[in-house]
Image (cartoon, helix red, strand yellow):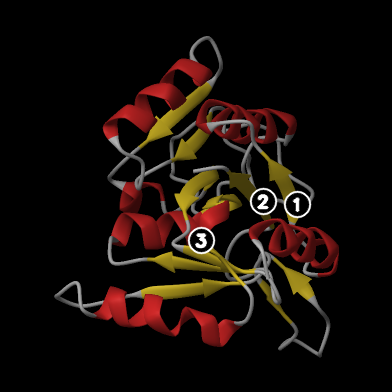
Amino acid sequence: MTQDQLVEVVKAKAPSVPVSLYEARDFADAVQYAVDVTEKRRHCEMLLPKEGETYGPLSENSFPTMLDRFIAAPGLSDEEFAVLEGKTAGTDIILLRSGLRGHMGGFNTSITWAEALVADTVTCVVNSNSEEVRLGTMVAEVSVMLVRKSTLLNKLEDANSLMLDLLNRGGASYTAFITGPSRTADIERVGALGVHGPLELHIVLLED
C-alpha cells in the first residue's frame, strides 16, 4: 500500500478503536492540538490526594481535581520541547519533562512519539526504554501520540524489522503496542475505560 492508502485505512478504522485522529500541518500545529485538547477537558482527577494539599471540586468519580493542568512530554527533543513551551505560554498548563514518579497521582496529558503505527489495527508502536516515557503513556488521562506518516505499516507482521532494530540498539528493550485507550472488562464483564491507563488516545499524523 502507498502512504496515502495507509492513511485512509487509519482514518476508516480509528473510530472503532476508538481513537481521535488529527492530521497536523507541522510539529507546531501538532503540539497546539495537544494543548487545545488539554484545555478543553476538566482538570485532572488526583487519584492519590496528599493530606494538607488544596484541590478543586470533586469529580464525577468523587476524586478531588487538581488546580493546575499538566502536560508530560519526556520524549521530546530540546527543540521540540521549546516549541511546546511557546504554545503553553500564558496558559495554566505546567510542563513536565522528568520526575514523573512524583506525579503518579495523575496528570492531564502526555505527548509521545511513536516509532510506527500499524494501520490495520491502529496500533502505536512505542519505544518505552525510558521509564519517563512508560509513565507518561500509562498515567496521563489523555495520551497524544505523534506519528510520522512515513512510519505507517500495513499489518502487524510488518513491524518485524522495526522490532529487531529496537532489540539491537543495546541494553534492555521495552516496546509498547498501544491500541486505543485503556480498557478492561474483568469486573463482572462490564467494559470500563481508563482503569489501567489513559481515558483517551489521540493520534496526530505528521509529514516528515
Estimate how packed mark 1 is, as few (under 14), some (14 to 19) or many (20 or more) residues with alpha carbons within 10 Å. Answer: some
- Residue 45 in view of the camera: no
Estimate how packed mark 3 is, as few (under 14), some (14 to 19) or many (20 or more) residues with alpha carbons within 10 Å. Answer: some
**Closest to the observer: 179 or 106?**
179
Among the 4 quarters of the image, the one containing residue 43: top right
Mark 1 against mark 3, which lies toward the viewer? 3
In x, y percent, where is residue 85?
42, 21
The amino acid type, in three-letter code, at marker 2 is: His
**Number of the label disc, if any, that sits on residue 202:** 2
**Closest to the observer: 166 or 102?**
166
Q: Which residue is mark 1?
A: 20
Q: Secondary structure at mark 3?
A: helix
Most distant residue in the top direction: 90
The amino acid type, in three-letter code, at marker 1 is: Ser
Residue 34 is left or right of residue 85, and the answer is: right
In x, y percent, where is residue 3?
64, 59
The amino acid type, in three-letter code, at marker 3 is: Thr
Q: Secondary structure at mark 1?
A: strand
**Residue at image x 51%, y 61%?**
151
C-alpha separation, residue under disc 3 versus residue under disc 2: 17 Å
127 vs 103: above or below: below
C-alpha separation, residue under disc 1 versus residue under disc 3: 18 Å
**Number of the label disc, if any, that sits on residue 151:** 3
Residue 18 is left or right of residue 177, and the answer is: right
